[in-house]
Image: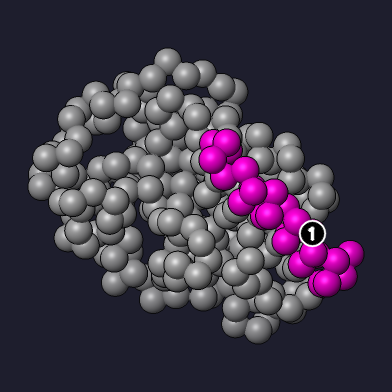
Amino acid sequence: MNSTDLENLVRRLSGQIKSRVREDTHPKYGLQLIYALWQAKLCGYKKITALEFGVASGRGLTALKNYVSQFAHHFGIEIIIKGFDTGRGLPTLKDYRDHPEIWVQGDYASRFQDNVLILGDVKDTLPEFISNWDDSKLGFVSLDLDLYHSIKDALQIFKMRPDNYLPAVMVHLDDANTQLTMNPWCGAELAVNEFNQENTLRKFEQKHRCWGIDNFYALHVLDHGIRNGTIIPEMPINCFPL
């Protein structure tokens, strides 16, 4: 598959999602997954990982699994899916940064069960998950943990070795500027802003509305071999809005 054939495939698949956006569950997941697969194919990677932090009812994780079954075989790429959730709803809110005017401890408790679900507080479950990382490349992450402190814990996923990632990881930042009292000094936005301040070569960037996806961020892995020119991808990474 050459770059033109790949671009045409991405156009066709993304067009399918956009044409049924009112019927699809979590279409933003589908579109960002396509961009992750496109980038992975250009790099020459054979396996990527997609994660959802904050599973709750399971609708998002189920949608993600459905999109994987629809798209992965077109690209010849294996996709590993995992979901992280407490299984008990939101944990204790610590201060104003957790938006106590919006959220309540125990919100979004769910009995959803799935073999890809990792239950427990993310600060406890994520370190072991990271320690067992294989040759997959992290390609898509949904951060839907609501609370600042929980999101801060989940952002440890972006501190692995650079070769564990796509050069740019697709990130859905669910609770960013979607309610009146949300702001850059609390919640999800504060967590990613602090991450940018603390890390020189890993940077979150909110993608422009021209991409047609709300709450769409990229985590730029600037110390990745492809980003610094020490590794040459199979094809130039010329992904653009479709």
Q: Give the quarter of the figure containing the C terminus.
A: bottom right
Q: Residue at x 13, y 39 (%)?
A: 100
Q: How is the image coloured?
A: one colour
Residue position marked by numbered label 1 in the rendering: 9
To which quarter of the image does residue 122 belong?
top left
Q: Residue furthest bottom?
A: 229
In screen coordinates, is 1 left or right of 168? right
- Position of residue 88 measured from the top left corner of the image (x, y, whole percent): 32, 21
> What range is drawn magenta here?
1-25
Q: Check residue 40 for magenta coloring.
A: no
Q: Give the quarter of the figure containing the N terminus.
A: bottom right
Q: Residue at x 62, y 72 (%)?
A: 240
Q: Principal SS element in the magenta part?
A: helix
- Position of residue 172 measured from the top left corner of the image (x, y, whole percent): 45, 52
Can you see residue 12?
yes
Nearer to me, 137 or 204: 204
Q: Residue at x 41, y 67 (%)?
A: 206
Q: Amino acid at mark 1?
A: Leu
